[in-house]
Image: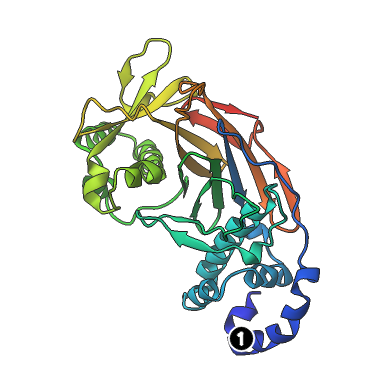
């Protein structure tokens, strides 16, 4: 398995003959309508379910030369496979959305915005106005996910529920968590529960990529420590520590130590139990346009996919359980 990564020269030579018939040989993707301004889409793939070397070669073929080179430079088959699936998932996900023309996933080009976040570099065409599509990717060795919105920024993160921390949890948390969050973790006596609370908080921290970058900040330890995750119980409006986050009835908010009055009113957050094995955090900007329902739940559709092979809509099933934030699955 994965022998083509170790046979780079022979593989590249074989491409010369294959590329000529690439468009005809490329499997089709099931088209999907673009999400509305009120919707968030999430796609994920489980690397352990992608075993076909032929399929992995097809994924490699839709990547740009730069993306291929980046994967070749990585060490270890598992790391290479995860990176390959991440890039293939982004390309196939964006290509399947119905626009005015059919998009070949291989033809997509990307660039980075001023905050360093990747975005689609649509090719100029006087007869076509590209959709204001936003996406974000996150992956572990066991799950790769891609979030998609239209008009509003999105940030996601996925983490294994059983991810092990080499260092002491509290010592590690001191580098990235606020004083209030650190106090919460320190108050949990049970090591396993403390570990799970840490993973949830960490997932939400990294999942707020869109929020952090919108503030013009990078990802050093300092910015992470300058905001605290709280929950607001909808029935009372009271703010509580993260420990109260156990159902969709709790709205997730973020308080910035630089601006305590700012409770990220322009952003929605959600925390999911995904595939029974991972936590997934989603952060999207609220629709502040005229007529936009800023306080409406996050409208979420989720697909499990093996690109070019099968797609399964899993939102509303046991594979997607909202454990924090106001979420409506469809």
The residue drawn where x is 63% and y is 85% is 12
The image shows residue 106, relative to residue 187, as above or below, that is below
The residue drawn where x is 59% and y is 40% is 41
Badge 1 is on which residue?
7
In the image, residue 293 lies at what x, y percent?
50, 21
Where's the N terminus, which quadrant?
bottom right
Q: Considering the numbered disc 1 on the image, is that residue within a helix, a strand or a loop?
A: loop
Residue found at the far front of this picture: 126
Res. 171 visible in picture: no
Q: Please tell me which residue lies in front, 113 or 309.
A: 113
When asked about the image quadrant of residue 92, the answer is bottom right
In the image, residue 226 lies at what x, y percent?
22, 40
Where's the C terminus, which quadrant?
top right
Residue found at the far top of this picture: 236
In the image, residue 169 lies at what x, y percent?
29, 47
* Residue 19 relative to residue 7: left or right: right
């Amino acid at each position: 398995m994965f022998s083509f990564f170790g046979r780079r020269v022979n593989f590249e030579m074989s491409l010369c003959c294959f590329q000529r018939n690439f468009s005809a040989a490329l499997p089709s993707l099931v088209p999907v309508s673009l999400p509305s301004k009120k919707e968030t889409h999430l796609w994920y793939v489980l690397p352990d379910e992608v075993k076909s070397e032929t399929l992995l070669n097809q994924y490699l073929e839709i990547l740009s030369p730069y993306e291929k080179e980046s994967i070749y430079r990585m060490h270890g088959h598992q790391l290479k496979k995860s990176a390959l699936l991440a890039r293939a998932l982004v390309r196939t996900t964006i290509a399947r959305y119905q626009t005015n023309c059919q998009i070949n996933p291989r033809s997509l080009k990307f660039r980075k915005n001023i905050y360093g976040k990747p975005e689609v570099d649509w090719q100029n065409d006087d007869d076509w106005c590209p959709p204001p599509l936003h996406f974000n990717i996150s992956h572990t060795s066991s799950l790769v996910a891609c979030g998609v919105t239209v008009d509003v920024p999105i940030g996601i993160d996925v983490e294994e529920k059983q991810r092990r921390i080499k260092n002491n949890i509290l010592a590690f948390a001191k580098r990235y968590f606020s004083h209030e969050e650190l106090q919460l973790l320190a108050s949990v006596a049970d090591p396993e529960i403390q570990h799970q609370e840490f993973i949830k908080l960490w997932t939400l921290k990294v999942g707020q990529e869109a929020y952090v970058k919108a503030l013009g900040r990078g990802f050093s330890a300092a910015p992470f420590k300058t905001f605290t995750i709280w929950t607001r119980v909808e029935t009372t409006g009271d703010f509580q520590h993260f420990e109260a986050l156990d159902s969709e009835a709790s709205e997730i908010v973020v308080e910035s130590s630089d601006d305590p009055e700012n409770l990220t009113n322009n952003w929605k957050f959600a925390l999911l139990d995904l595939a029974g094995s991972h936590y997934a955090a989603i952060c999207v900007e609220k629709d502040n346009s005229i007529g936009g329902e800023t306080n409406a739940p996050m409208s979420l559709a989720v697909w499990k996919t093996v690109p070019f092979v099968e797609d399964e809509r899993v939102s509303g099933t046991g594979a997607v359980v909202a454990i924090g934030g106001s979420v409506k699955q469809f």
